[in-house]
Amino acid sequence: MNIGNQIENNRSYLVTIEKLIKGEKDEDGFPLDDHWEPYYQNYAYINNLSGNERWMAAQVEQDMNVRFAFRWNKKLDVIDAKNYRIKWGQRIFNITFIDNVQYKNEGVKIDALEVG
């Protein structure tokens, strides 16, 4: 699969990969709260992987698993599921899997689970 063609031939969306910043201190040496900062922004093809409904406390809760397909960029080589997440509009997704497709450095697929 050529992700570049997939992005060009289908609707793609601007998304931001955010990096968790922790352990920083202010100018007086006091620790700052952990926070997220933009790390990388680009267009991605987005597709739902599945929607699993669960009944909890008489309410339906839906898990939204989504795949983001990017053209390869060296900034994507360092991301991991622990210190990075994806923001699409106001929606936040925790990364669950990262795949540099066939290690060709042409496309990267990132599976993620929507938060909240």
Image (cartoon, rainbow, N blue to C red):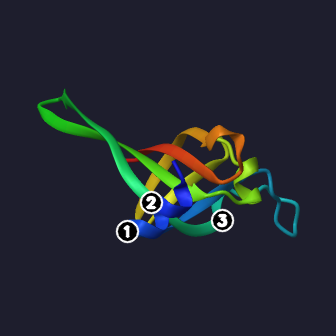
Rendered image quadrant of residue 33: bottom right
Q: Is residue 17 left or right of residue 75?
A: left
Residue type at tag 2: Tyr
Which residue was labeled with disc 1? 11
Which residue was labeled with disc 3? 40
Residue type at tag 1: Arg
Going from N to C along the chain, the mark reached first, 1 or 2, is 1
Residue type at tag 3: Tyr
Residue 70 point in image, percent of width and height? 56, 58
Q: Which one is in front in this view, the residue at disc 1 or the one at disc 3?
A: 1
Which residue is at a point 83% across and 60% down the rendered structure image?
25
Residue 82 point in image, percent of width and height? 64, 40
Residue 1 point in image, percent of width and height? 51, 47
**Decide: marks 1, 2 in contact (CB < 8 A)?**
yes
How many neighbours does mark 1 have within 10 angstroms: few (below 14), some (14-19), or many (20 or more)? few
Q: Say which mark, if any, is on residue 45.
A: 2
